[in-house]
Image (spheres, rainbow, N blue to C red):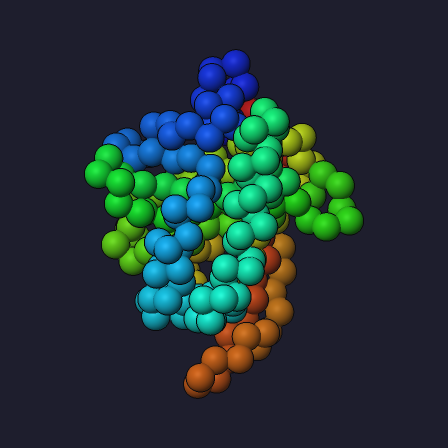
Amino acid sequence: MSNLNENSGFYSKLKQGESVAFHQALTIRLIQPSDLSDIITMLGDEKVNQYLFFAPADESLYQGFFTPIIENTQEAMANGEWPDNPIFIIRDQQGRYMGMAAITQVMFCEGNYEVGYQLPAHSWGQGIATSACQLMTELGFTVFGSHKISADCYGANVGSYKTLEKCGYQREGCQKDYYKLEQGFDDKVYYGITAAQFFAPA
């Protein structure tokens, strides 16, 4: 499943904060302060936030969440290191925001990571989420040395869990009626992939 490696220069450029070619005609790079307004706009879209438990929310909450991550990212790049919890921004050739993806450490569980991705509605249906999930998964296993990567989503978010399945993730559980909606409830579904599964011969 893995098709990238540290020696290709792809990861090293990402680590330095450079924009690199991604998913046909797009680019991807580590998050920067200028990205925050596009992220907040995306999270305010009802089409997007219907599947997000943390949105919509007051802009100050997003500022409080993302600002330390951005500061850590800038410090890490200056020191030639990976950020603690890398978030990547995807844009097209004209600079239009196309989404974000992340591979984050699970607190207190060394070697455990979580993958996530959020795309604005205009980016849906183009395979971008699948490419982003594949890249985050490769980073987790081939660069960060993860032994397990997990993800979860709303049970109604078919696009999200189909993306995970395309990337080799297995459904591992479900919490019924976890999310309270305006009308009724939705399940929380859990997916995961181990290093052994990732590196297994096709």
Where in the figure is residue 80, as x and y percent of width and height? Answer: 59, 24
* Residue 97 in view of the camera: yes
Q: Is residue 99 left or right of residue 86?
A: left
Residue at the (55%, 30%) spot, across then down: 77
Q: Is residue 187 left or right of residue 162?
A: right
Where in the figure is residue 93, as x and y percent of width and height? Answer: 24, 35
- Vertical position of residue 43 compared to residue 184: above or below: above
- Taking depth in this image into account, of 179 and 15 the one nearest to the observer is 15
Residue at the (69%, 43%) spot, across then down: 112
Where in the figure is residue 168, as x and y percent of width and height? Answer: 52, 41
* Residue 134 in view of the camera: no
Check the image and name the residue furthest to the bottom: 183
Residue at the (72%, 39%) spot, across then down: 111
Where in the figure is residue 45, as x and y percent of width and height? Answer: 33, 66
Question: How many numbered marks appear?
Answer: 0
Quarter where residue 64 is shown = bottom right
- Vertical position of residue 71 compared to residue 58: above or below: above
- Taking depth in this image into account, of 91 and 48 the one nearest to the observer is 91
